[in-house]
Amino acid sequence: MSKINLKKIVGMSVVSGKGEKMGVVSDFIIDKKTGKLIAFNLKPSRSQIAKKLPKNKDGTISLPSQIIESLKTTIVMNEKKLKILLLKKRLKS
C-alpha cells in the first residue's frame, strides 16, 4: 500500500471489489510503533454485504487493513479476503 495522509481516510467511501458501496470510514487504528494502518471502522451503508459483517457496539464495522486492495480516492476491498472474513463470522456464529 502506498503512503497516504491518514486525515484523508476519514470520510472516504469503501466499496467491495465488485463496486458495492459498503460505507464510509469513520475512524482508523494505527500501530504506534510503526505508524502503519492496522484497521479502520466504517459507518455501514444499507448494502447486502455491509449487513452481513459483524458490527461493533456503536454500529460501525471494523475491517483489517490487509483486505484493502486499493486506496486512492475510494477504498476498494479485496473480494476474496472479504469473503474469507464473512466465512469466519459464520463459523463463529
Image (cartoon, grey):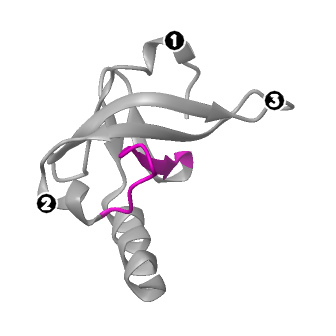
Task: Identify the residue at image location x=14%, y=48%.
Answer: 20
- Residue 85 versus residue 5 in the image, above or below: below
Q: Which mark is residue 7?
A: 1
Hey, what amino acid is under mark 1? Lys
Q: Nearer the viewer, residue 91 or 73?
A: 91
Residue at image x 44%, y 21%? 9
Label 2 Cα neighbours within 10 Å, binned few <14 / some 14-19 / many ≥20: few
For label 3, the residue is 32
Question: Is 76 in front, or is 23?
Answer: 23
Q: What range of the chain is rendered magenta?
A: 53-65
| Secondary structure under the numbered disc 1 in the rendered image | helix
Image quarter hosting the N terminus: top right
What amino acid type is highlighted by mark number 3? Lys
Residue behind mark 2:
48
Q: How many marks?
A: 3
Measured as percent of width and height from the top left, residue 37 is found at: 63, 34
Give whichever of discs 1 and 2 has the lower sequence position: 1
Mark 1 or mark 3: name the one nearer the start of the chain: 1
